[in-house]
Amino acid sequence: MSQSCLMVAQDYKAGNAAIDRGDYATAFKHMRPLAEQGDAYAQYWLGALYDFGQGVPQDDAEAVKWYRKAAEQGHKMARVQLGLMYRYGRGVPKDYAKAAKWYRRAAKQGDRRAPVLLAELEKKLRAKGKWPLRQ
């Protein structure tokens, strides 16, 4: 195994272990280099750390940035979280159509929360006469 592959594997192992024990500052330290190199899993975790202010100051805009990077690579949990950010206008302007888009993409990948979130959004907007959404 090459030295760089070994370092990546060590960062994954250390980052995941830190997450498991609730040491989010250490998780951030190990996940950030991986995220910056384009790793969708690490990008998702950076989004989550910023989203919930764990190990870093809470920052919706940074959470959206990292969730989007992971979501665009097909990370289904990042797609759900990005949909939530659009639904509630956290770090981005509130946009139900974009929320629905990301929920649909996650649902197509088999995420179990996405269809429920999409149905809740549809129910809410139907009651207001705003469904179907324009894409």
Image (tube, rainbow, N blue to C red):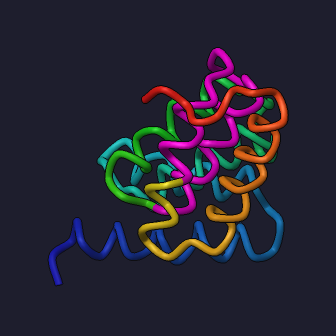
Question: x and y percent of residue 60 in the render?
Answer: 71, 27
State the residue at coordinates (66%, 77%): 17
Q: Quadrant of residue 57?
A: top right
* Farthest-out residue, left: 2
Question: x and y percent of residue 107 in the render?
Answer: 51, 66
Q: Magenta stretch containing residue 98, yes or no?
A: yes
- Residue 71 or residue 14, whichever sits in front: 71
Q: Is residue 48 left or right of residue 97?
A: right
Classify the position of the C terminus by image quarter.
Answer: top left
State the residue at coordinates (35%, 56%): 39
State the residue at coordinates (48%, 43%): 101
Question: x and y percent of residue 52 in the render?
Answer: 81, 43
- Residue 20 or residue 134, whichever sits in front: 134
- Residue 61 or residue 37, whichever sits in front: 61
State the residue at coordinates (31%, 48%): 38
Q: Magenta stretch containing residue 82, yes or no?
A: yes
Q: Is residue 30 above or below residue 37?
A: below
- Residue 72 or residue 110, whichever sits in front: 110
- Tell me which segment is drawn in magenta: 76-103
Q: Is residue 15 above or below residue 86?
A: below
Magenta highlight: main SS: helix
* Farthest-out residue, top: 93
Question: x and y percent of residue 122 in the render?
Answer: 70, 45
Q: Is residue 78 left or right of residue 125?
A: left
Q: Quadrant of residue 116?
A: bottom right
Classify the position of the N terminus by image quarter.
Answer: bottom left
